[in-house]
Image (cartoon, grey):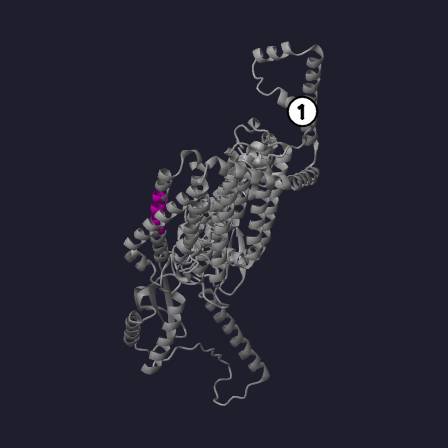
Amino acid sequence: MKLFQLPAILLGIVMLFVGNISVHAQQIPFSSSSTTDDAAVELSGIDNPDAVRALVSRLSDNEVRDLLLQQLDVVAASQKIVQTTSETSLFELVTTAIPISVGSAVKEFPSMMSDLVKLYGVFIDSLGPNGLLKLLGAFTTAIAAGALVEFLVRRLTSDWRAAVNKISSEYSLVDILKLLSRRFILDLSGLLAFIIVSQYVLKRLVDPQSAFIVHHLLWNVVIIPRLFSVALRFAFAPNRADLRLIHTTDSSAKFLHRHLVGVALLIGAFLSVLDLDRVPGGENIGPKIGFLSNLTIHLYFAFIAWQSRFALIDIISGKNDEATPIEKKVATLYPYYALLVVVSVWILVEVLVARGHLELVSKGIQYSTMFILLLAPVLDTVVRGLVKHLTPSISGEGRLAQMAYESTKRSYIRIGRLLVVLFVLAWLMRIWSIDLVDLNATDLGAIKAQKFIGFIVIVSLGYLCWEIVTLWLNHKLAAEKTASGASLEPAGPGGDGGGPGGSRLSTVLPLITWFIQAAIIIVTTLMALDDIGVDTTPLLAGAGIVGLAIGFGAQKLVTDIVSGLFFLIDDAFRAGEYVNVEGTMGTVERISLRAMQLRHHRGPVHTIPYGEIPKITNYSRDWTIMKLQFTVPFETDLIKVKRIFKQIGLELLEHPEYGNDFFSPFKSQGVVSVDDVGIVIRGKFMVKPGKQFAIRKEIFQRVQRDFEASGIQFARKEVRVKLDKSDADDVELSEEDKRLIGAAASEASEEHAATDSSESKPGE
């Protein structure tokens, strides 16, 4: 199971390190002239009124006039630049800034190389005779001493390392995290020993005047790349597939580990070169090397993203059983997204320089922006991995429990993604110094950005509340339904009704969910509209008028809603219960705000508004009594019938399927009535709701079997027609006599059918 899929996080750490380069880099002016440079030189050091008076006193009137005209030209030119850049479109700005930057870099490249050679010469000369050899010797000695102490630390911790290096395919996620954390601490302890000893040796052996360059060189090209290597080993585990937290191959893990460390080395090399700005004459090396360093670093990132594109797709998608088809499609686009981010950030740097926002470039916020934009899709994968491993196991069994479990996981994922969006927005607002309270303090255009960001934040928080409330309510609803044994499978055609209903909470929760969701939508919409400047007072007034009109024009609707509310308060019915509403019988299948739906056990669905329900008969509440009637001939031994009923009741109490459903066993109630056919005997039993019809079938079968074994027959109705010609035994019937006999039999049959129909209602 792979959880933390963080290559872009480590890319971001590299980018934060890269931000240090920006302090020296990319200070290419948008426009310049020789006159302004001369004026600036002539006026350098003039920073107080006394110096200005002294300068003016030494100049002639013509010289003062020329100097004043030069300064006015400088001010006019600067104002023209600001106006031009503010009115320039983004496309024009990009197409203007990049050619200027590229042209300046190409033009400065020959002089940059010669300046670097000169600076190194000046630096070496400043060290004195054999100074370079002494410096290199001290540098090598410091590294050797640090490596020796690190080796000793590793030997002292060899037993712990052996336990970590034990390979197994049965590690759980917790075991993997523990082993990786131990290895990280062990590697870091050895590296910490190296840092302490090497720094101490350098301090003892190197001249303080040149110590800063050697110390920076040690940190830039040795220590920081090794720190990155330790961090990357935690995430990629290039040599331990059994401990790898990301979904990728061994070769891809090694490639990313190797080249990300290479990025750190490249950055360290540029930083070490920029240290030459402390050498006399090296003050301008930063602007000259800035474009080249920025371009090289971005090209290296682009190379890594493209070369490892298939590995990045695997990392973002995770395992095949974890990602949906949409998530897999998004994963295939991530390498192109990464390239787009890298190119866009490089263009951003050039635009910022062209606009004169050098303070933004010097802070390195462009690299922080690239970091968070590359990190966002990876955080989505982390969210999915966390949800997969941290979601509580499925509660209950069956399709309903499985659907509730999957719905819970997707809700957690949506909540996690929303938190990622808020995190990204907060990060971008922080690094770009965007304050929602007072955006006017910045020069980024402020009011519109404030309203837009505020709108996004309010909508995001509203959606977060929606997801959390819905998740909790659905979890409670699924738990209630699972505990009550509810099933998503509808009863088959011709099945029996009267099953047990759900709990009262499971009946009311859907309506509560609807009300809360509607309230969240209304409140969020009003707050968001108010934040962007829309006056919500007319909307509220209009809603009140509409509500009043609905109240007058839809009194029946109000009646239905109020009646339903009181039915629910009285707990008259619950979802899944079998009820009778004025002759309409069925199982409560759905409850809405206005009506209820009853499904008859033969299939039809009846929708009944609450306002039209005068009385509800509930056959599924707590317990149910079923009474069965049997008609036997007059000569039947009633004592024997009673014993048969009692024996059947005792047998059903021991039945493996029905035994636990009885509150009172099946027994005889004696003679109910005597009619012209025979003696009517009744038996009854009391069971849990929903079991009565299945048990009734079982009793019918057992009564028929035992009656037949005991020689007892059921009474049959007979129609006897007495004719006036009945004196003789063999009277030949006329057609009229046969017609009269048939009519009498038909009338008796209809009366019998009507009687059976009136006695077939449940519960009787």
Q: Is residue 195 magenta?
A: yes
As drawn, the residue found furthest toward the front would be 129
Quadrant containing the C terminus is bottom left
Q: Position of residue 29 (x, y in %)?
A: 64, 32
Q: Give the answer, above or below, for where 369 lies relative to 585.
A: above
Taking depth in this image into account, of 509 and 156 the one nearest to the observer is 156
The image quarter containing residue 344 is top right
Q: Position of residue 91 (x, y in %)?
A: 69, 40
Q: Give the answer, above or below, for where 451 lies relative to 336.
A: above
Taking depth in this image into account, of 223 and 428 the one nearest to the observer is 223
Quadrant containing the N terminus is bottom left
Q: Looking at the image, which residue is at 48% across and 88% down? A: 728
Q: Is residue 42 left or right of residue 722?
A: right
Q: Position of residue 237 (x, y in %)?
A: 42, 57
Q: Is residue 405 left or right of residue 52?
A: left
Taking depth in this image into account, of 382 and 133 the one nearest to the observer is 133
Q: Which residues are magenta?
A: 187-197
Residue type highlighted by circle 1: Thr
The image quarter containing residue 535 is top right
Element class at badge 1: helix
Main secondary structure found in the magenta portion: helix
As drawn, the residue found furthest toward the bottom would be 730
Disc 1 target residue? 36
Q: Position of residue 543 (x, y in %)?
A: 59, 35
The image quarter containing residue 58 is top right
Q: Residues within 10 Å of mark 1 (few under 14, many from 20)?
A: some
